[in-house]
Image: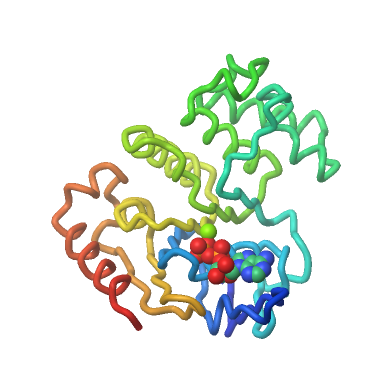
Amino acid sequence: MIVDLQHVKLTYQAPDGEVDAISDISFGIEEGEFVSLVGPSGCGKSTLLSTIAGLEPPSAGTISIDHEAVTAPSAKIGYMPQKDQLFPWRTIWANVTLGLEIQHQNTGERQAHAHELLERYGLAEFIQKTPAQLSGGMRQRCALIRTLATDPKILLLDEPFSALDYQTRLSVSADIYTIIRQEHKTALLVTHDISESISLSDRVVVLTHRPSRVKNIHTLDDLKDVPPLQRRDHPAFRTHFNEIWKELDAHA
Ligand code: ADP
Ligand code: MG
């Protein structure tokens, strides 16, 4: 297991008392696996990602990454928050190399790697532009390349497609799936879109309402070798969809 969560619990101390966000979550992710996390709004999905990223210590339980306990943010993790968070005044190149600057890794070799990623994924000719000059889908690819530039083993993606319109979302999610597979990364994707979780992942972890627990874990073996867009037309798709839908709908 490259990611291992054991009985993770998280309680926020708010001014008007405690908020139990996560009650008890355990699951693991194998190296190279793509796992989606779905759950009702406010059930603690973003909280869980920031805890795995080492930004928020759990109130109880343990998290390990590559067999080491998480105590602080690690270079092994690339965390892509919900908004693309590109800086509007920085060029695409200055945005993509921001993580390298922060981690003091802005070497020639790393820059060459970043440039290669921009070329491979169709953004090389835009490096002197600013984010406002790019489409929403291009900005998402740029944010992903920024996350990949530091060469993390594990990607944590928090609703990366939610700001995109439906058509763009389909094509960008298929692009991002290809990028993650080709770069041999392990991914944990938060989404509230059941179809998206089934079309992209190896397994789907379904969470309950807050304070969340794992309700069920779906293994999508029957869709394993089917690319994201084709999965939506596969007979197994509807079966998984209906099961997850029922689990999310149930008030338990
Ligand atoms: P999700 O991403 O699943 O929609 P979140 O992880 O953002 O849910 O939030 C889970 C719960 O914790 C929500 O009830 C939210 O209001 C609460 N919460 C999130 N962040 C904080 C915080 N910093 N302080 C107090 N409560 C918080
Ligand atoms: Mg969230």
> Compared with residue 53, is residue 150 higher up or lower down, i.e. above or below?
above
Percent position of residue 70, x then y: 72, 70
Q: Residue at x 67, y 38 (%)?
A: 149
- Between 37 and 225, the residue placed more toward the observer is 37
Query: Is residue 65 visible from the viewing direction of this image?
Result: no
At 48% across and 76% down in the image, what residue appears?
Answer: 210
**How was the colour assigned to the protein in this rendering?**
rainbow
Q: Quadrant of the C terminus?
A: bottom left
Q: Does residue 227 lie above or below 40 as drawn?
A: above
Write the residue at 63% across / 42% down.
148
Q: Is residue 83 visible?
A: yes
Residue 90, image quadrant: top right
Rendering coords of residue 216 (x, y %): 36, 77
Vertical placement of 92 versus 2: above or below? above
Residue 43 rendering spot, x and y as whole percentages: 48, 70
Residue sitting farthest toward the right: 104
Which image quadrant: the N terminus?
A: bottom right
| Residue 21 image position (x, y, % from top left) | 57, 75
**Left of 231 or right of it: where is 82?**
right
Q: Nearer the viewer, residue 113 or 146?
A: 146
Q: How many marks?
A: 0
- Give the quarter the ligand 1 occupies: bottom right
Who's the residue at 74% across and 27% down the image? 94
In the displayed structure image, the side of residue 212 where residue 246 appears, left or right: left
Left or right relative to 25: residue 193:
left
Residue 211 position (above or below residue 130)? below
* Front position in the image: 50 or 235: 50
